[in-house]
Image (spheres, rainbow, N blue to C red):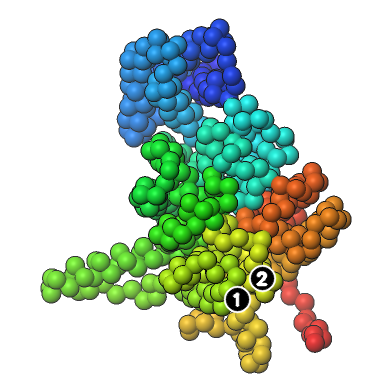
Amino acid sequence: MKKYKLKYGPLLFSGLAILTLIFDVGFSQNEKILSIINHSYFVLLFGIIITIPIKYIADFKSFQKLRIWIIELVLWGFYNYLLVSIPFSELTNGSVNPKIWLSIAFSVSLIREISAVKVNWRYKHATPATIFISSFALLILAGTLLLMLPRATHDGIHFIDALFTSTSAVCVTGLIVVDTGSYFTVFGQSIILVLIQLGGIGIMTFTSFFAFFFLGGSSYQNLILLGNLTSENKISEVIGTLKKILFFSFLVEAIGFALIFINISATSVMNRPDALFFSAFHSISAFCNAGFSTLSNSFYDINYRFNYSLHSTIVLLFIIGGLGFPVIINIYRWMKLVVINRILRLNKRREVIHQAHVFTLNTKLVLYTTLILLITGTVIFYALEYNNTLAEHKGPGKIITAFFGAATPRTAGFNTVDTNIISIPTLMFVVLLMWIGASPASTGGGIKTSTFALAVLNIINLAKGKNKVELNRRQIPETSLRRSFAFIFLSLLIIGFVIFLLFKTEPDKKATDIIFEVFSAFGTVGLSRGITGDLSGVGKIIITLTMFVGRVGALTFLSSIIKKSAEKSLEYPSEGILIN
C-alpha cells in the first residue's frame, strides 16, 4: 500500500508547485513572502526530480513501454537542467524569464502525472454525456476562481461577474458583463484565452491527447468515450482523429495569428508585445467562435472599422472553426486521396485509387447549408442595411461588411457594425441565424446547420407526400430526423422559458433586447444590444445557465439527468394520430 502511494509523489509536488505559481502571480507579495515563494520553487522542483525515480521503483510494472522511458528521461533531464542553471538571484530580482521556464516545467509535470492516473469509467453511473458536461462545469468553476484573483483584474470582480465571464469563455459565447480589454489585466486576459481554447476544442480532447502521448495507449472504455466526444465511429481511428483535431486547430490558429499581426502592423498604435498578444488572442477567439475581444467595441472600433483585410481574416477563421471537425477531417481525407491519385497518374504502371463516396453525406449537407446561409445572409444583410449600418462603407467594403454581418451571428459574436441600430427586419434575420448556429462537433453552438437542413428537407418531403427523406441517393435514418426535431423543440422551449423569466426579472429592458440576448446566449453567439452588463444578479445567472445549456446541447444536458430505460424487443400495434 505504501509503494502504491509513493508513485503519486511527482503529482503531489507538481500540484503544490502550480498552486504556488497561482499564489505568486495572482496576489501582490511583499519581499518576505516573495523570498519564501522563490525558495519554494527550487524545493518543489527538487522534490519532483527526487520522486520520479521513486515512482518507477514503487510501480515498475506499469512502466514497461520504451516510449514512456524516453519521455520521462527527457523531462527528468529538463528538470535537472533548470535546477542547476537558474540562479536564485534572478528570481529575487523579479526576472520574468526564469519563472516562465519554471511555469512550463511545473505545468508539463502536472499534465504528465495527471495523464498517468488511470480512471475506470463506469458507464452505468457516468455516461459520455455526464462526463462531457462535468468537464465543462469543472473548467468553468476553475476559471471563475482564477478570474477572482486580485491580479486578474484592476479593481476586483464579483463572483457572479467572474462566473458569467468564465462561462462565456468556456462556452465560447462572448457575452460580457465587464469590458475585457480595460477591466482585466494581461494575466486575466490570458486566463480567458486559455478558457476559450480549452472550451472551444474541448477539455476532454486535450486531456485524452496528453494521456495517449505520455502513456502511449488508452483503454477500450476510454476509446469508446473519446469516440462519442469526437464523433468518430471507428475505435481504431479515435486517437488519429484526436491528433488531427489538435494539429489542425493549432495550425489554423497559427496562420490566423500571423495574418492578423500583418494586418494590424501597418495601422496599429500598439507596441510589438501588445500587437503579438492582440493577434494571438483574436486568432484563438475567432477560430473557437468565442467572440471575445480586447477592443471595447469589437471590430467596430474606429481604428479597425475599415480594416477589411483584418475582417476577412477573422471571418474566415470563425467560418472554418464552425464547420465542425468531422467535416474538416473528411475534407482532409479527400484532399489526401486527390494528391495520391495525381502522383499515381505520373506512373502509368500503377492503378489510380478509386474510393466511392469520399465525401460523407454529413459533409455535403453541412457544406451546402453553410454556403446557402452565407450567400443568402449576405444578400439580405446588404439589402436591408445598405443605407443604415453599411452607409459609412463604400464599394467592396460594403460587401465584406455585409458578409461579416451574415456570418458572425452563426455563433462568432464579433461585430463590425453597431448592433444597437440595425433595423428590426435585420434583427429578426440575425436572430434566426443565431438560432441555427454552426455545424455539429464544431467550436460553435446553436441547433446546428444539419439539424435545420434536415427539418427543412423533412417539411419539403411531407409536402410532396413522401414518407422517407432522401438526399444524394441516400436515405436519412429515422433516428436522425427524430433527434433533429427534438433539438428544435427543446431549443424553442428553453429559449421561450428563459425569455419569460427575463421579462419578470428585467422589467425595465426592451422586449427586443431581451429576445436578442437570449437567442445570443443559447446559440453561444455573443452579440448583444448592450444590456448584458446592466442585467440584475438573477438575470446574469439565468443567462449563464442558458449559455451552458446552449454549449453542451439541450438534448445532451437532458440525457445526462434522465435515467436511460432499457430498450424493449417487443413492438406494440401502431395507431395513427390526427395532425393538422
Q: Give me the disc on residue 461.
A: none
The kind of residue tagged 2 is: Ser
Mark 1 or mark 2: name the one nearer the start of the chain.
1
Residue 275 in sight in this render: yes
Q: Which residue is mark 1?
A: 384
Q: Quadrant of the N terminus?
A: top right
Answer above or below: position of 503 versus 477: above
Residue that extends furthest to the front in the rendered view of this protein: 392
Q: Position of residue 360 (x, y in %)?
A: 45, 71
Residue 209 quadrant:
top left
Q: Which residue is mark 2?
A: 423
| Residue lying at 45% horizontally and 50% vertically, measured from the top left | 283
Answer above or below: position of 450 versus 461: above
Q: Nearer the viewer, residue 566 or 11?
A: 11
Residue 201 in sight in this render: no
Residue 141 quadrant:
top right
Q: Quadrant of the C terminus?
A: bottom right
- Asked if the residue under mark 2 is in contact with the one under mark 1, i.e. CB atoms within 8 Å, the reply is yes
Neighbour tally class for label 2: few under 14, some 14-19, many 20 plus, Cα within 10 Å:
few
Q: Position of residue 405 (x, y in %)?
A: 55, 66
Q: Between marks 1 and 2, how big is the CA–CA gap? A: 8 Å
Neighbour tally class for label 1: few under 14, some 14-19, many 20 plus, Cα within 10 Å:
some
